[in-house]
């Protein structure tokens, strides 16, 4: 490294440019009031378990016996 060069003094932020005022970005669009937050749809109530097999003859007989 060339030691003869003095370290460049930290450049002060250029004063001529005032900090640019943050442009008001398009105002944050408020959530459209007409639409209320959609309530989480209740998951469909669990269907009662559908007996996939018709009652066997045996159960029918037992029902008849109960009668």
Image (spheres, rainbow, N blue to C red):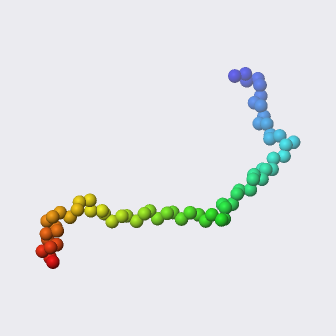
Q: Is residue 56 left or right of residue 46?
A: left
Toward the viewer: 9 or 21? 21
Q: How many marks?
A: 0
Residue found 85% across the figure and 43% down from its top? 17
Residue found 77% across the figure and 31% down from its top? 8
**x then y, percent, for residue 42:** 46, 65
Quadrant, the N terminus: top right
Quadrant, the C terminus: bottom left
Residue found 77% across the figure and 28% down from its top? 6
Toward the viewer: 14 or 38? 38
Of all residues shown, which one is farthest toward the bottom?
67
**x then y, percent, for residue 59:** 16, 67
Residue 28: in sight, yes or no?
yes
Toward the viewer: 42 or 15? 42
Please tell me in which quadrant of the rendered image residue 4 appears.
top right
Of all residues shown, which one is farthest toward the top?
2
**x then y, percent, for residue 10:** 77, 36
């Amino acid at each position: 490294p060339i030691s003869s060069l003095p370290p460049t003094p930290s450049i002060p932020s250029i004063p001529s440019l005032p900090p640019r005022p943050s442009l008001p970005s398009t105002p944050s669009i408020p959530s459209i009031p007409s639409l209320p937050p959609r309530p989480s749809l209740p998951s469909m109530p669990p269907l009662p378990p559908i007996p996939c097999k018709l009652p066997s003859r045996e159960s029918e007989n037992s029902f008849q016996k109960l009668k």
